[in-house]
Image (tube, grey):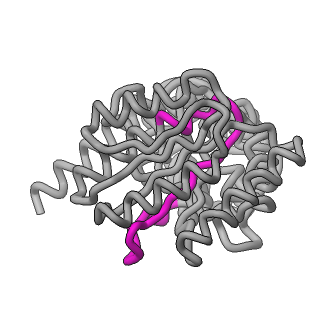
Amino acid sequence: MEEAGEKNEGVRGRFNRSLGKTRSKISRGIGNLILGEKNIDEEALLDIETSLLTTDVGFDATEAIIGALKERLSRKELSDTKALHQALRIELTQMALPLGKRFQVGSARPFVVLFVGVNGAGKTTTIGKLSKHLEVAGFSTLLAAGDTFRSAAAEQIQAWGASNNVPVVSQQRGADSAAVIYDAIETARHRGIDVVLADTAGRLQAKKELMDELSKIKRVIARADESAPHECLLVIDANAGQNAISQLRDFDQAVGVSGLVVAKLDGSARGGVLFSLAHAQASQECAPVYFVGLGESADDIEPFDPDAFVEALLAP
């Protein structure tokens, strides 16, 4: 139990360290309120509302949070700043909880994970980090260099393969992305490798022909294994703000997004977008945030922990 506690403290510490930019924006409005002597009234809630909006929590999600706090205020549950702080923590955690499902490697071999997203979201770096994460967990991995469009994309993923000592399947620039990923799946099957992590070229979700190409990739993957891809992960740059909502909608329509990775959370002051992602999916099956990127090194990827996330945001 002690070892688990130490590990949990480590995760919370990494969240706390990496969310400094978002936390500083929130604390400008909330920190003075919580630590000061201000009366708890609707004007005080307006300060919280402004702070949430500046971190890209989004209008609808912010409205839901403030609405819940106003109800507590009307029931005289917010008697002091400590009660307000605790109530805000509860509301934020409840909103984020549906995003907290853990990523699991299923029984299929190879287990195929397809990564999609816009240009520059951090897909290739996420693949490299996740490869190491899975190798440490005892799963063998193979990387598929399915981004055959971007200059040096193959070299980047090969560098991650060399760093993690895992194989990479790639072809020349301009090759058919679907064929590269298909070959990677067959190679993994013949070598008895557990997981294939497949990269794809970044694309603007508004470009229909590029989104149609993703659908083609998914169909070709199914020829190798009719149940594949077993996970389709959308990588979102934390700095995308509210554009993350439209990315999720459009990529989900094209390929069926099963989960999210929020990259570059450490360098963003807009980490509140995770609450917006949760609220936007409140009336449907939620695509969870499996992982968040908390830095640039290979170890800087963590399973998303809603409790640790909210605690870090509201830390003094």
Give the image quarter of residue 21.
Answer: top right
Up the image or down, 288 lies above or below 293; here it is below
Position of residue 276 measured from the top left corner of the image (x, y, whole percent): 71, 50
Up the image or down, 14 lies above or below 228; here it is above
Q: Nearer the viewer, residue 263 or 75?
A: 263
Highlighted range, magenta: 100-125
Q: Nearer the viewer, residue 292 or 128?
A: 128
Position of residue 58 measured from the top left corner of the image (x, y, whole percent): 77, 43
Q: Nearer the viewer, residue 164 or 81?
A: 164
Residue lying farthest left? 2
Q: Quadrant of the N terminus?
A: bottom left
Position of residue 171 measured from the top left corner of the image (x, y, whole percent): 53, 38
Q: Residue at x 72, y 61 (%)?
A: 255
Q: Residue at x 48, y 32 (%)?
A: 19
Q: Main secondary structure of the magenta part?
A: loop
Let me know if residue 83 appears in the view.
no
Up the image or down, 158 lies above or below 180; here it is above
Q: Is residue 158 left or right of residue 234?
A: left
Q: Is residue 221 magenta?
A: no
Q: Quadrant of the C terminus?
A: top left
